[in-house]
Amino acid sequence: MRLSDTIESFIKQMLGASEENGVELKRNELAEYFGCAPSQINYVLATRFTPDHGYVVESHRGGGGCIRIVHVERDQGDFLDYLIRERVGASLEDKDARLLLRQLVESGTISRDDGLMIASALSPQALSVPVPEPVKSALRARIMRCMLLTVARREQRRKQTAATALIRIDHT
Amino acid sequence: MRLSDTIESFIKQMLGASEENGVELKRNELAEYFGCAPSQINYVLATRFTPDHGYVVESHRGGGGCIRIVHVERDQGDFLDYLIRERVGASLEDKDARLLLRQLVESGTISRDDGLMIASALSPQALSVPVPEPVKSALRARIMRCMLLTVARREQRRKQTAATALIRIDHT
DNA sequence: AAGACTGACTATCTTTGACTTTTATAAGTA
DNA sequence: TACTTATAAAAGTCAAAGATAGTCAGTCTT
């Protein structure tokens, strides 16, 4: 198993054990514990605890400095909003797309079926067409946004219909 | 016996022995074991462990990297699957795509929601990216096929799950 | 000619170390 | 005391080195 993976699960275990959903750690201590370079910790944070992964990382240098990692529970609307508004910009890498979809499904923001549908539309197989990679990234971003919007609209419709039904029932 | 065949059966034996229906292996280790070039492993994977053969292969480069092979049961002779291959060719015009989708929805082959999802992935907005029209048509065809396959697979899964449930109930 | 095989080159991921930046605190000075 | 400066203790950055796997064109076998 890779050191990065070990450190990743160690941190996640810490997070799981903590009362709140955040932990504080000393970069150097952790590095010494695992017998690695301190910058290794930064690497782990940069590759496995990003906002896309659902984490926020803050740090403080100087004497008594530390690193704080918080797992953010995003409520459904927020996450979709964030993705549509900010995260999915003009381009989207294949790997990022997959990661985001997994987050969306795991957080219950979209259904597993919807996730699979979007994934299949973005799959390398679907996009295996002779266009340069930057254009492909742009395409991924556009398709992702369109489909997320479709999901959001559908949910909106569902809610409204449900609400209307309630009102109807109320009025009978 | 050819080396490729030997490696193929070796991997299949590993798969048979594993608890789950997947295995992980190191390309270089395997190559050394069989005294061949590492790329030979890729050749075996490319010719004998394709999706058509019912396998999914994932890999991870860099330190601690590996190759993972999973055996998946395929839904053979599925109706949608078949329909797709015949009807959706190598290219698909925007107009034709919409027409086909409407037919599929109205005939009850796919749900309205699925139709909307596919339509949004194929929408001019999603595909408004600077590529020549013939390429775009090819793209539409590919996305359409991938997504329909996803729908087909999901239905397949549903059926199987339902059947399994019935069997369970039967056995109680 | 088709399939099997290889090797050189490429792409990607991990790990490290040298150098930088920030901050708290201690020491020095008017 | 109040202010400045020096020092040490964090954390950050980035590029290079190491470890895997992928690709592809060409050679060999059948």
Image (cartoon, coloured by chain):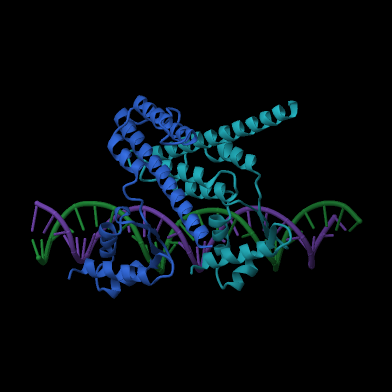
Chain colours: A cyan, B blue, C purple, D green
Q: Is residue A112 left or right of residue B160?
A: right
Residue B114: x and y, percent?
46, 36
- Note whether A145 is above or below C21 in the view shown: above
Left or right of A52 in this view: B102: left
Q: Nearer the viewer, residue A3 or D7?
A: A3
Q: Quadrant of residue B104?
A: top left
Q: What quarter of the picture does the C terminus of chain B occupy?
A: bottom right
Asked whether residue B27 appears in the rendered view, the answer is yes
What x and y, as percent, mark residue A143? 46, 36
Q: Nearer the viewer, residue A168 or B57?
A: A168
Residue A38, visible in the rendered structure = no
Tell which of A106 and C18 is nearer to you. A106
Residue placed most toward the observer, A18 or A113 = A113
Q: Quarter-wise, where is residue A39 in the image?
A: bottom right
- The image shows residue B165, relative to residue B114, as above or below, that is below
Asked which quadrant contains residue A21, the reply is bottom right
In the rendered image, residue B117, in percent from the top left (x then y), is placed at 47, 35
Across the whole image, how many numbered discs are drawn on residues?
0
Q: Residue at x 34, y 27 (%)?
A: B96
Q: Quadrant of the N terminus of chain B?
A: bottom left
Q: Residue at x 65, y 46 (%)?
A: A74
At x 25% / y 58%, what residue is drawn?
Answer: B47
Answer with left or right where residue A64 lies relative to residue A121. right
B99 shown above or below B59: above
Give the image location of residue A78, x and y in percent: 64, 40
